Amino acid sequence: MAKLWYNRRRVPAVDGPRTNKMRQWGLKPRFLLLTIVLFLAAGTVSFILFFLSARRIVESLGTRFAQTNTELARARIMGIIEPEVVLARKLADSPVILAWILDERNPAKAAAARAELESYRLAFGDHSYFVAIASSDTYYNQPADGARTVVTLRPDAPSDAWFFRTLQSPRDWQLNLDYDTHLHVTKVWINCVVRSNGRPVALAGSGIDITAFLADLAKEAREGLSVMTVDDQGNITTAQNIDYLERNAKSWGGQAKLTAFTLADSVADRAVLGRLLQEAGSDPETVRTARIGFAGAQSLVAVSALPGLGWTIVAAVDLDRFITVRSFTLILVVILAAMVLVLLALAMFVDQLILAPLESLTAAAGAVARGRYEVDLPPSGVGEIGALASSFSTMAGEVRAATENLERQVRERTQQLADANARMVEDLEYADLIQRSILPGARALDRRLPQRFILFRPRDRVGGDFYFFRDDGDSFLLGIADCTGHGVSGALMSMYTQSALEAIAARRAGADPAALIQELDAAIRSGLGEDAGGLGGERGLDIALCRVEPGADRLRYAGAGIDLFGHGPRGPLRIRAGRGAIGSRRRRSSAGPATTELPLAGTAFYLTTDGILDLAGGPRGFGFGSSRFAGIASACSSLPLAEQRARMEAGIDQWRGGRPQRDDITVIGFRCVSQGD
């Protein structure tokens, strides 16, 4: 057993010559040297920490100040603009107004639209509205007072460029600061796209007078604080400086607009500002801050997106007009004195009581970490360090014993699980062999029904679905069933049901399918003990039977819970089954399933259990559904049966994607040529 010894002056090496060379001075000389270096550096470190702490405090206060004013501005702007945007979008969605836009010259539709627009005008805060129709380039504007203005917009006119640009935008609405040459006013316009079947046909909306808007924005303005809003391109849309707004309002065509990036002092500052605007757009609830040069001063800039409006608030706090670092000089003196005292006290304490025993404990811990549990670290000294050394040695021994015991238990349990899994797999393989052996063989099916495909996919190794075939000479019986349960329980129920159906079909050869289902229902209820309690939980099955008579060119179908799908000369068909599973406790109807007769010639028939219909898939995890199944069946009904199966499997797998199969799947598709053909 390796032993680690230590004393207060020196700890012998346990890891070789390299460690001896590193420790040739011992801990005490090295720590004394370190203490001297720290003492000489204490003044410099304290001075640096002072400025860092003071700067952090200043930035923290400035950040809170900027964040608070940003949130106040956001609340005020949202309160002003958001109700108007909601109302403008309702106007753009009005069916009455859309009907007029699509038939602009119809007097009745124009009158109804005008009445509708008037009701919206009274609701708007500005008591005005506008509609610009793409088909005629006609611009209608009804101000709060005065007659309605009607003008024609021109694609080559810079002042009308906003209309054609907005129509091409994928967004449903935009906020624009624009100078209207027809009305000679500057407003924040709410431009909502009116669509017909997804196609933009007009713009509609209202405006907010910029004078009142800026008055509300400036109410909370404070010394050293500048607040503005920008759009998704950084263009300034509102600000306390009216010159910014007038410049951008009259910037048409290719004229450059004033942006927040223009006010940033350097390329790096513009990059930081761009990142803040991008992050604010992805998380509107969070106020983002950074320190950059802005408008010629070092500023703390806070940005916050206005949810749903496409604008972002930018608030800048000028740090030169805020709290300065020189206010913290007294704190610097206190920090320097405290650092000197702490370093001296720490050096004495660590050298006398901690360093030597701690080094030995560290070496021992490293050995344990590398898997060397044979560590004997006798207690040395007094107090907690000595007790810790003793406890560490005990712990290392216990960890070694526990590790060995755990490894042994893991090996034993792993072997047990492997043996149990092997037995379970063997049992399931045998059950699968038994279940498949009682299904109809391909040779019997080939004699009477060569044109067919069968898709049989149990969810587990075995399942509750089965298909049935019996040759009765002039006719044959073909069926499909879905028993309650999956896995072993479903397989047992399917074998029991198949045995009962085989006995009934043999005794009543050529019988009507509905009668066979009724008799099978009675047999299952009797066999499973309906009145005496029987099995706990839900039981029973869905079933569909087809009596095919090629000589008579006739198919007789009856079902309980499983519909018959097909595609014939007259197009797709679907015969709905009776509701309610047979053999179920809940099924009490005395009517039973009905038989439906269909011609065979030229028709492809399909039977499927609900494993496909309920198959979860698609982008939202919805069920496959009977309509989608019927569509695939009809689309490929004219193809050879083998190709139909491939198409069906491809459609199922594409729909399911990576989701698990949650039910047994069975599909039978067939065509039967009458003897007269």
Image (spheres, rainbow, N blue to C red):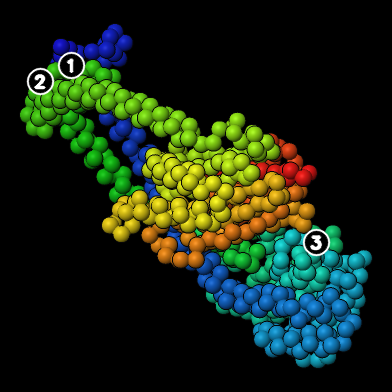
What residue sits 68% from the left and 59% below the top? Answer: 232
Along the horizontal axis of the image, is 516 left or right of 347?
right
Q: Which mark is residue 378?
A: 2
The CA span between labels 3 and 2 is: 83 Å
Residue shown at the point (50%, 46%) measured from the top left:
505
| Disc 2 residue crowd, few under 14, some 14–19, many 20+, Cα 10 Å | some
Whether residue 331 is situated above or below residue 440 in the rendered picture: below
As drawn, 374 above or below 124: above
Give the residue number, with chain letter if any, for mark 1: 374
- Residue 663 shows in the view: no
At numbered mark 1, what does the secondary structure look like: helix, strand or loop? Answer: loop
Farthest left residue in view: 382
Picture quadrant where residue 111 is located: bottom right
Q: Position of residue 627 (x, y in %)?
A: 64, 56
Q: In which quadrant is the N terminus drawn?
A: top left
Residue on which disc 3 sits: 168
202 sits left or right of 536 in the view: right
Q: Nearer the viewer, residue 105 or 462?
A: 462
Q: Give the total number of marks visible in the rendering.
A: 3
* Amino acid type of the residue tagged 1 in the rendering: Glu
Measure the alpha-carbon separation of dots 3 and 1. 77 Å
Q: Nearer the viewer, residue 184 or 508?
A: 508
Pinpoint residue 270: horizontal percent, then vertical percent.
65, 50
Q: Earlier in the sequence, mark 3 or mark 2?
A: 3
Q: Earlier in the sequence, mark 3 or mark 1?
A: 3
